Image: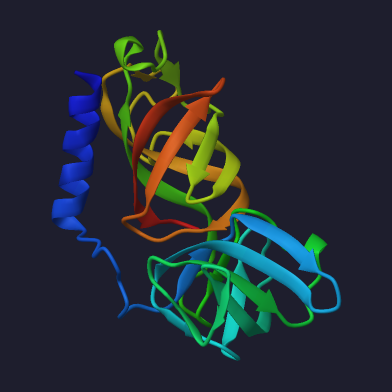
Amino acid sequence: IGQQKIDELLEAVDTWIPTPERDLDKPFLMSVEDVFTIGGRGTVVSGRVQRGILKRDAEIEIVGKSDEVVKTKVTDIETFKKSCEESRAGDNSGLLLRGVRREDIKRGQVIAAPGSIKAHKQFLVSLYVLTKEEGGRHTGFQENYMPQMYIRTASEACSLHWPEGTEDASSKMVMPGDNVEMTATLHSPIAVEPGLRINIREGGKTVATGLVTRILK
């Protein structure tokens, strides 16, 4: 039952927000999975390219985990252990960045085309709350619930509240098996946009899954 409900939710997301297998036409976006230093060359970030095409020597922005956006240039691209001229949606690539220190980049940030995405701390999410049989919580929760939210490669502490104007918000319960819309507030800003899939985890298990529906802050 649990897997069926999750599959139905993901099918609905795919129906209303189609995601092409290799989305080449949109601005470049890659979520940072790992960061390392190559002696004598500089800092490399690696991850799977989610959309777009990036050319060598292109300008990029590092977005998320901070209100500051870092601007730099990609001086080399490596895909399948070979240096290449570009990185495309679907590739697992390493990007050599100019003038950026390893400690200034964190897993969960994104490498993006300039001006194409912003980091936010508060947004509406549409959630399906897993039941006990689906591996979720045994009991319900009230607003100000504080789990971890997983967004692409980012893991961020968050709090969940009922949207503004909800009646009896302070006493209203969310029960396993419910479909709800709630306001999520993150501890640190993350690059998000409507239609982005997210997971809610607590104590090492997924307790809810869903998507971002509207940006608030």
Q: How many marks?
A: 0
Q: Quadrant of the N terminus?
A: top left
- Across and down, in percent, residue 104 comes to 78, 64
The residue nearer to you, when weighing 195 against 159, is: 195
Image position of 123 (left or right of 154): left
Residue 33 place in picture, x, y as percent: 59, 55
Q: Determine whether, in the image, residue 155 is placed left or right of residue 39.
A: left
Return the residue found at the far right. 40
Residue at the image point whose x is 41% and y is 9% from the top = 139
Q: Kindly identify the residue that appears in the image at 26 percent across and 23 percent down.
A: 178
Q: On screen, 171 above or below 119?
A: above
Q: Nearer the viewer, residue 51 or 71?
A: 51
- Lateral position of residue 26 relative to residue 183, left or right: left
**Residue 180 screen position, x and y as percent:** 29, 32
Q: Is residue 74 visible?
A: yes
Q: Determine the residue positioned at 21% across, 38% down.
A: 9
* Residue 104 seen in render: no
**Residue 112 screen position, x and y as percent:** 52, 74
Q: Is residue 17 above or below residue 117?
A: above
